[in-house]
Image (cartoon, rainbow, N blue to C red):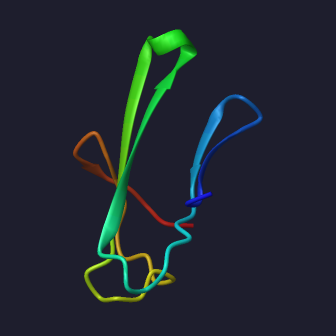
Amino acid sequence: MLGVCIEDGAALVVDPRVPDAWPGFTVRLNLDGGAVRCVVRVENPSGSAAAAAAIELHGVAGTIS
C-alpha cells in the first residue's frame, strides 16, 4: 500500500507511494516469525514524494536504482 512490500518472500522492496503533503511515514515489519525486525522510515522534506533523495540501511548509505 505505501510502496513497501516483500517480493518473492525474500526481498524487501521500498518504492514510496505517498501524497506529497505527507511529511513521511514509518513501517515496522516483523519477518521470519519475528526473528527479523525491520523499520523503514520514509521522509519527504521537499514535499515531493516521487523524488527519492537518499536511502540508508542500518546506518549505512545505499544506492537508489
- Asked if residue 47 is positioned above or below residue 1 in the image, the reply reads below
What x and y, as percent, mark residue 26? 35, 52
Visible residue check, residue 15: yes
The residue under the point 49% across, 66% down is 64
Image check: 44 left or right of 30? left
Image quadrant in which the N terminus is located:
bottom right
Image quadrant in which the C terminus is located:
bottom right
Residue 6: quarter of image: top right
The residue under the point 55% across, 60% down is 2
What x and y, as percent, mark residue 58? 28, 39
What x and y, as percent, mark residue 15? 57, 63
The residue under the point 51% across, 83% down is 50
Number of marks: 0
Visible residue check, residue 42: no
- Asked if residue 9 is positioned above or below residue 60 in the image, the reply reads above
- Asked if residue 53 is positioned above or below residue 25 in the image, the reply reads below
Residue 21: quarter of image: bottom left
What x and y, as percent, mark residue 27? 41, 46
